[in-house]
Image: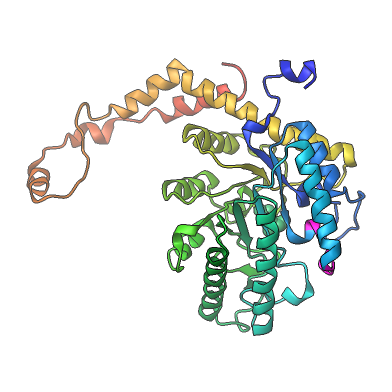
Amino acid sequence: MNSRATQDAYAPRPEHHFTFGLWTVGNPGRDPFGEQVRPAIPPTRIVEKLAELGAYGVNLHDNDLVPRDAGAAERDRIVNEFKEVLEATGMRVPMATTNLFSDPAFRDGAFTSNDPRVREYAVQKAMAAIDLGVELGAETYVFWGGREGVETNAAKDPCAALGWYRDALNFLCEYVRSQGYQLKFALEAKPNEPRGDIFLATTGHMLAFIYSLDHPEMVGLNPEVAHEHMAGLDFTHAVAQALEAGKLFHIDLNAQKPGRFDQDLRFGSEDPKAAFFLVKLLEDAKWPGMRHFDSHAYRTEDEEGVWDFAAGSMRTYLILKEKVAQFNADSEIQGLLQEIAARGGATDSRLVFSPERVQELRSASLDLESIRQDGYAYERLDQLTMEVLLGVR
Ligand code: GLT
Ligand code: MN
Ligand code: MN
C-alpha cells in the first residue's frame, strides 16, 4: 500500500468486503442503440486491478469466464489460469451465477420458458455453473431471472410459470444437497427489462415465493438498488424486510434515477440520502455480507474511467459509513431520537396478547389529547441529517 493510501481514511481494504462482478467493470459499453466503446478487459486483469484497488473479490456468471461453447479442455485451461491469479492476489469469488439470459434459446425465459426443452437446458446450464462456482470457492449463488416473464399475458399462464420456476429451484437445491456443497441461493428481483414484465417483480414477491420452496432455509435474497427503485419503491425498506427475515444473503449496490431503464450507475451517485440510509441499515446491523457493486462505468469512459468508477464506488460507501458514525455520535440528533423513544414516558406498550392484556387495554385511559396535539420533530431531525450529509456539522 502506498503512503497516500495508508493516510486515506476512505481507502478500501479487503476486510470491507467490497466485490464487483466481472460483468460490471468488464462492461464494454454496449447499449441497445450503440456498439461497444471499450475493449473487453480480460478477467485476469480485472482481478489484478481490483486487488490493487482494495477489493475483497470478484463475482461471475459462468460465461463471463468460460465462453458458452468452450470444450472441457479449454474450460479447464481458463479456470486454472483464473485460479492462479486469485491465488497470487488473494482475491476471492464469494458469489457466482448463471447467464440464463443472453442465449437466444432463453428468449421466452429459462426456468419459465413455454418450451420444456429450454427449462431442461436452463437447469443443465445452472448445474454446470454451480459446479464452477463451487470450484472457485463461492458460497452464495445468485439467480436473477431477467428473461423469466412475458411481453403479453396471452402467451403464458403465470401460475404455471411460477410452478415451473419453483420446480427448477427445488431441483437445484436438491442438486446442491446431493453434491454436499455448502452453497446458499440468493434470488434477485427486477420488475421489467429485458422482458416487458418479469415474474416475481420485487424483493417482497421473492420473499413470499421462497417460503413455497422445498428448502426455504437454503434460499434468501439479493436485492438490487436500481431494481427496487425501478418499481418506485424504497430500497432500504426492501433490504430491511430481507434482513429482518434473516434472508439478506447478498446485495447489489448501484444507483438509479427514478422512472428509467436499469441504469446501474455508480453507488451513491444519484441519491446520496437514500444511499446513506442503506449504509446505515447495513452498518448498524453489522451485516457481515459482501458489499457487491452491480453497476458499470458511464459509456463515455475508457479503461481508466472504469477504474475511477470502481474506486469511486468503494470510496463513496466508506464516506457514507463515516457519515453514519457521525450521525450516531451527534448529540443533538441522538437527543431527538431519545425524545422520540421516550414518547409516552416510561409506559412499555408491547402488544403481547393475553386475556389479562385484553382486560387492561379495554380499560386503559390513553392521553389522546396530547397524542393528537404533539408533533414528532422530524423536520428538525431530517434537517440535522441533511447537514451531516452536506458536511456542515
Ligand atoms: C445482469 C443484471 C444484474 C444481475 C446480474 C446477475 S446480471 O447484469 O442486470 O442485475 O445481478 O445475473
Ligand atoms: Mn443485479
Ligand atoms: Mn441492474
Horizontal side of residue 90 vs 372, given as left or right: right
| Residue in view at x 29 percent, y 30 percent | 374
Q: In the figure, 203 relative to 198: above or below? A: above
Of residue 63 and residue 312, the one placed in the foreground of this image is 63
Q: Quadrant of the N terminus?
A: top right
Q: Main secondary structure of the magenta part?
A: loop
Of residue 30 and residue 233, the one placed in the foreground of this image is 30
96 in magenta: no
Q: Quadrant of the C terminus?
A: top right
Q: In the figure, 4 relative to 371: above or below? A: above
| Residue in view at x 42 percent, y 30 percent | 378
The stretch of residues the image draws in magenta is 64-71
| Residue in view at x 77 percent, y 52 percent | 23
Q: Position of residue 391 (x, y in %)?
A: 62, 20
Q: In the figure, 75 relative to 168: above or below? A: above
**Residue 253 picture quarter:** top right
Horizontal side of residue 143 vs 381, given as left or right: right
Q: Position of residue 362 (x, y in %)?
A: 9, 47
Kindly tell me whether residue 115 is visible in this rendering. no
Q: Position of residue 212 (x, y in %)?
A: 44, 68
**Residue 323 picture quarter:** top right
Kindly tell me whether residue 14 is visible in this rendering. yes
Q: Position of residue 169 (x, y in %)?
A: 55, 69
70 in magenta: yes
Please name the colour scheme applied to the rendered image.
rainbow
